[in-house]
Amino acid sequence: MANRLAGATSPYLQQHRDNPVDWWEWSAEAFEEARRRDVPVLISVGYAACHWCHVMAHESFEDEDVARQLNEGFVAIKVDREERPDVDAVYMTATQAMTGQGGWPMTVFATPDGDPFFCGTYFPRQSFTRLLSSVTTAWRDQRDAVVKQGQAVVEAVGGAQMVGGPAAEVSAETLTAAARGLAKEHDHTYGGFGGAPKFPPHMDLLFLLRHHERTGSAEALELVRHTGEQMARGGIYDQLAGGFARYSVDAHWTVPHFEKMLYDNALLLRVYTQLWRLTGDVLARRIADETAAFLLRDLATPAGGLASALDADTDGVEGLTYAWTPDQLTEVLGAEDGRWAADLFRVTPRGTFEHGTSVLVLGRDIDAADPELVARWQDVRARLLAARSARPQPARDDKVVASWNGLAVTALAEHGVLTGSDASRAAAAELAGVLADRHLVDGRLRRVSRDGRAGEPAGVLEDYGCVAEAFLAVHQITADPRWSRLAGELLDVALARFGTGSGGFYDTADDAEKLLTRPADPTDNATPSGLAAICAALVSYAALTGATAYREAADAALATVGPLIGGHPRFAGYSATVAEAALSGPYEIAVATNDLSDPLVTEAYREAPGGTVIVAGAPDLPGVPLLAGRPMIDGRPTAYVCRGFVCDRPVTTAQDLIARLTR
């Protein structure tokens, strides 16, 4: 019999709808029930694609005896961290404060007031049942100590919020120090930063690309090229269907944690697109094209919008869909091509994964090989993918998250204009429409939607920043004033509702649900921090409209993370990326033309440094400030290149435009 989660919009909560645990969704009613029964609360936080969340569910939450113990002694609350990042942030801070580490599933025991007094992550069944007994005993016999522990944790969580700390202008020296800091941590053999587990450092790579453009640093570009190549040839990249997994369990990108997240692939699409723009590297172009195709093919939902993730598991087994043995290759390809594929993809009898299976890696540099060899490789890939498609497939978390779709819109817009992909350009505009029409409700953003319906959770700062940046990206590729207007409205809400009063931002609005503390974390995690995302949109909006107050707000917010950028760049990659654009101007380019295929438009996108705002369209197009007062000279398409609203002499040839942008 289904429990209270049967009506939840979250796919993660739906995964637990048939548990014998008497789950509650996060709600005031759940805590009131704990007060009425005088029992503690178990808050279990995870997400649909999480492997260890599935393991704990199978071991404990699906077990009748464990459920009986839980139901008798606790009010159990299940939370989707992707739907409620605010709840996750507060209790993750508590978990890290108590244990020194965090992760999912997150397991928190709290008082009926929500004060956490014991925190952890995954617990095996036997350990979990012992823990339930210990907490029940402590609640009954040592209540005062438990309550005091909870109060102490609440004080620690409140003190951990990063508001009102030291500020410093983000200077050229700061950004140079950040680039040098990343270079020191670079893995010169396998790329990336640090050791295992190794996550795609997309935001740091975006920063290094922009740092290279501003300073000419060959080292910064090489760090990106090397890391990009190693990831693309590793098992973290799906060598058959495209798309990146969440992270590699080893330092050399071979064996991934198989879940594929929308946000990783959106950010990496930007990295590989920009890397190709700067280097012409054929591998980078292929990965960009395949990643864009993966987003639109495998994550598109019937109701519009992109799904959040593909699961790490298939039928409860991690990697079941993706791993191969030499015999399986031969079965699909025949003996000769099977041997050839085993050598190319490094599939061995011993295996690189579990039970003698291997994750496919690209063992040879084949993109620029002889055309006949490339054709054979592509044929083998197609046949293997067709065979793999007949296997059981991982589940898909089909909720649409506003900020992650915003990241995808920006990435697809960039890919579309730089590569000439009409599919990417059209998808960017279509996805922006979904966000505007479904997630924007009464002037405020909703965090998630599913099956065409907006959910209840309010948008957080990350949503406002990423969606505003996305709307501005679509404004630039369409010259449609609707998108800049909507972006401005979102930024006005962010400034009015999320500001700290000292230049920074909280992650939740001032009228949002009150939690133990109001989260305010300026550090990047798997996605850009809300502060960094808002700053990106503020800088672009100011450049597109000439509204300097928004630029001033961005500069003030970036100053609050100046020390973080200079001292700990791995945790501030997106803020550093925005700061590079701000330090460069950013460039503002208006192309007055009635022909959007004109070479001036193409070269503006191809040659302008990252962070540049570009609008092409008819002169004095209504609602498009960048085109105001910018006529075509002698009736010819004309480009105006400006920085800080100070413009060079307009040019009418692609050669002159390139000279303006490369001097």
Image: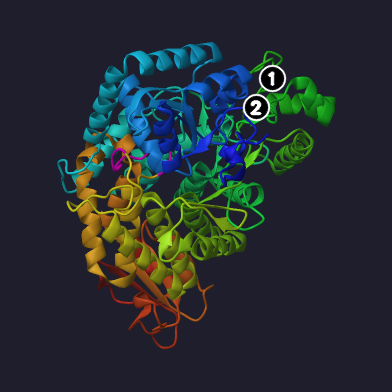
User: Which residue ends up furthest to the front in the rendered image?
Assistant: 36
The answer to which of 601 and 75 lies nearer the viewer is 75
Q: Are marks 1 and 2 in contact (CB under 8 Å)?
A: yes
Identified at 29% across, 57% down, the residue is 497
Closest to the camera, between mark 1 and mark 2, is 2
Say which element carries label 2. Answer: loop
- Of the 4 image quadrants, the one containing the C terminus is bottom left
For the record, the magenta segment spans 516-527
Mark 1 or mark 2: name the one nearer the start of the chain: 2
Query: Taking 321 as reference, is 68 above or below it?
Result: above
Residue 646's tag is: none
Residue 557 spot, x, y in % from top left: 23, 51
Query: Taking 524 as reference, is 412 above or below it?
Result: below
Residue 357's tag is: 1
Report the side of 240 relative to 480 (left or right).
right
Q: How far apart are marks 1 and 2 (CA)?
A: 10 Å
Residue 383 spot, x, y in % from top left: 78, 38
Q: Tag 2: Cα neighbours inside 10 Å, few (<14), some, or many (≥20)?
A: many
